[in-house]
Structures are given as C-alpha cells and as structure tokens.
Amino acid sequence: MSTTIFVADDDPVLLRGLDVALQGQGYAVQTAPSGPELLSLLEEGSSPDLLVLDVMMPGMSGLEVLRRIREDERWSDVPVVIVTAYPDVEVEVEARKRGASQVIPKPFRLRYFLEQVESRLHERDGCAEG
C-alpha cells in the first residue's frame, strides 16, 4: 500500500514541483490549489498519510484548514506540514497550537522538505528515529 500525501498551495509552480518531487520518492500525491478544495478531497473519502498546507491561500488559510482537520476525528491524527512565505514566530506558534507537526519557511531546499516529510511519516508510524 502506498503512502498518500495531500498538498495544498495556491502557487501552481510550487504545487507541481512538490507533486513531481513527492511522486519521485514513491508517494501517491493529490494536490489542491486552495483550502476548500483540499477539504473537498478529504470529504470524498480519501485518507492521506500526511498533509502539506500553505498558510496563505485564497478562500481559506492553511491555518483554518488545519483547525478544521484537527476538529474532525477522521483526520485528527494525520501529520500536517505547514509551509509559509511568512515565517514569523506568531505563524509558527499558531500553527503548532493548532496541531501542525512541522512548519517550514519558504523558500526551502527540496531535500530538506523531503527529509521533513519522511521524518513526519516515520513519527506517525511510531518509529523511534526521525
């Protein structure tokens, strides 16, 4: 069974790049250009192993998506990696309070991003290393 990662970001170039990079690591990937579209994917019955959310998106911020995900028992334990072009302490603190597993400031090195994704997945699976 393959690991499924959902990615929501309103930057089409970054969204496509993360899609290709994650698929290149063997992950099944579903993408959404907005928070509401990501929530629709979840409502369709899909069950991701990890979510990647941009903070600033049209219609609904990634932090609001995170809040809604954490309130729903179906996805409350899914690791969430927040990526943001606004890496101030307040955004990170709020993301952590809402249940983010990791906050990564943009721009980021792809290798670092992939390492963080792998680490969050290992944590979810109960592995000691990460």
Image (cartoon, rainbow, N blue to C red):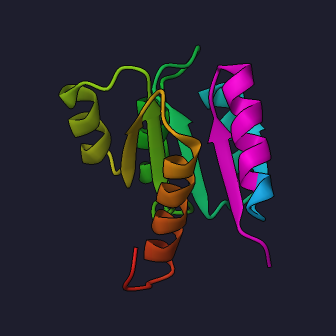
Q: Write the residue at 62% across / 28% down.
A: 9
Q: Write the residue at 56% across / 62% down.
A: 74
The residue lying furthest to the top in this view is: 58
Q: Is residue 129 above or below residue 61?
A: below
- Residue 13: in magenta span: yes
The answer to whether residue 43 is seen in the rendering is: no
Would you say 24 lies left or right of 80 here? right
Would you say 76 lies left or right of 87 here? right
The answer to which image quadrant residue 19 occupies is top right
Q: Position of residue 65 (x, y in %)?
A: 50, 36
- Residue 57: in magenta span: no
- Span of residues in magenta: 1-22
Would you say 110 lies left or right of 21 here? left
Q: Nearer the viewer, residue 40 or 89?
A: 89
Q: Write the residue at 46% across / 60% down.
A: 76
Q: Write the residue at 20% across / 27% down.
A: 90
